Amino acid sequence: MEAITDIQPLLKTNPIPDLGEPSILSEAPSDMIPFQHFLDMAVEALNQASSQEVGSNLAVQNYLQGQGSLEDAVFALNETTSMIQLANQVLTTAVTTFREIEQMQV
């Protein structure tokens, strides 16, 4: 058997670029703490999910009246469910993180 001596990688790898600070910190107003800004964004996501829920209800109502398709109604409901679950998970994680920070000994 011959020994394999000249092995080259299939893909060239580039070093991870320095992206600087996270954008959430750079977008926060100077008089607002970043965690509060994060919570405000999470609340905005919940408001958007609420707006999506209204659209989903309209899609179901259109289907029931024979003006829309079942696929549109199911898709709208699934999209709303996903948005609400994601927003809920983000808020739960934020509250858990805040409680852990609050319990830290300085």
Image (cartoon, rainbow, N blue to C red):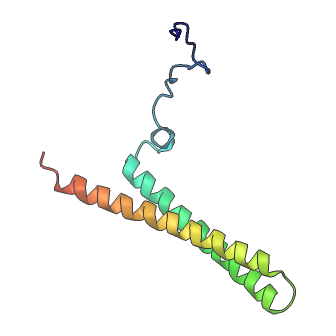
- Residue at 47% x, 58% y is 40
Q: Judge whether 7 appears above or below 88 on screen.
A: above
* Quadrant hosting residue 92: bottom left
- Residue at 52% x, 11% y is 1
- Residue at 24% x, 52% y is 101
In the image, taking residue 14 as reference, residue 70 lies left or right, namely: right
- Residue at 25% x, 60% y is 99
Q: Judge whether 17 appears above or below 51 on screen.
A: above
Provide residue 37's location: percent of width, then percent of height: 44, 52
In the image, taking residue 23 as reference, residue 65 lies left or right, namely: right
Q: Judge whether 93 appears above or below 21 on screen.
A: below
In the image, taking residue 54 as reference, residue 24 lies left or right, namely: left
Report if residue 6 is visible in the image: yes
Q: Quadrant of the C terminus?
A: top left
Report if residue 51 is visible in the image: no
The number of discs equals: 0
Q: Judge whether 54 appears above or below 16 on screen.
A: below
* Quadrant hosting residue 83: bottom right
Looking at this rendering, what residue extends furthest in the bottom direction?
65
Looking at this rendering, what residue extends furthest in the right direction?
67
Q: Nearer the viewer, residue 50 or 62?
A: 62
Looking at this rendering, what residue extends furthest in the left direction?
105
Q: Nearer the viewer, residue 70 or 53?
A: 70
Provide residue 50's location: percent of width, then percent of height: 59, 74
Provide residue 2's location: percent of width, then percent of height: 53, 9
Provide residue 15's location: percent of width, then percent of height: 51, 19
